[in-house]
Image (tube, grey):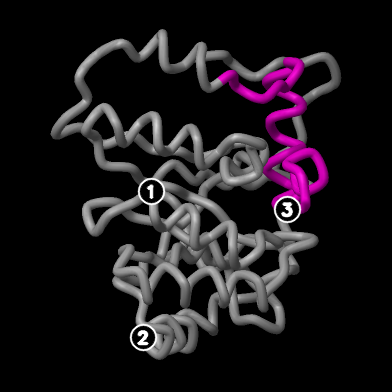
Amino acid sequence: EVRMQELRFLAPEAAAFFKKTVPVRLTDADVQVLNSFLDVELRDNWITLCGNYGAPIYHPEFVSLVNMLKSKGCSIKIVTNGSHKKREWWQELCQALTEHDKIYFSIDGMPHDFMQYRENADWPSIQAAIEICRDNKIPTVWNFIPFRFNQHEIEQARDLSNQLGMTDFIVEPSDRFDQQTEHLVPERNLLGPRWSAQQLVPLPRGHRPPTS
């Protein structure tokens, strides 16, 4: 099994952003501590499991975490690239989920080139995960971030998501670009709402951006 530490740079530009702005030591959350902290009824609430620096499914006790949350009555949204987990692991996860939950697969492009952004990702294991979730009636969503290298593939990816029997396909424009990632900037109509060309302008030496 590939641990989260090995996949933390699936999206290296995002990782670099958080290394600069959130210089904290990363550890795996303790499921028992979370269970005590969430000592409340969660029925009719959604809980989103989404890693900003790494993907949630690589937590060593992820299925136990999901079982704990489901025992409190909530619905769960999981956001992940989905790479490198075994078929048996996905079967176990699907047993913990229901048709009221959703898994968002972050796949930015077609199988032959989406690794340009999500390094170390693996299409065969992602496809197996999607098929297992589909066969277990777990809703699945293809989450597509447009970049310069994949902006012409959106409709192809949408068609592939339909062929795989996925529930939905979402285009999620990003606005997190800077000088280092300027080569990834797509056409303006595919940029996020907070995008500004000023993000590509180098800051004067010693200048710090505002924190609010």
Label annotation for residue 169:
none
Query: Which region shows up in magenta?
Result: 1-30
Q: Which residue is labeled 3 in the image?
A: 10
The vertical placement of 53 against 86, above or below, is above
- Within 10 Å of disc 1 (Cα), the crowding (few <14, some 14-19, many 20+) is some
| Identity, as a three-letter code, of the amino acid under mark 3 | Leu
Picture coordinates of residue 79, whole percent (x, y): 47, 49
Distance, label 2 to label 1, CA atoms, is 25 Å
Helix, strand or loop under label 2 = helix
Distance, label 1 to label 3, CA atoms, is 26 Å
Q: Which residue is labeled 1 in the image?
A: 96
Residue at 54 percent across and 52 percent down: it is 80
Q: In which image quadrant can residue 4 be found?
A: top right
Mark nearer the N terminus (1 vs 3):
3
Label annotation for residue 162:
2
Helix, strand or loop under label 3 = loop
| Identity, as a three-letter code, of the amino acid under mark 1 | Ala
Mark nearer the N terminus (3 vs 2):
3
| Identity, as a three-letter code, of the amino acid under mark 2 | Asn
Distance, label 3 to label 2, CA atoms, is 25 Å
The vertical placement of 173 against 37, above or below, is below
Picture coordinates of residue 55, whole percent (x, y): 61, 44
Q: Choose between 14 and 95: the one closer to the eye.
A: 95
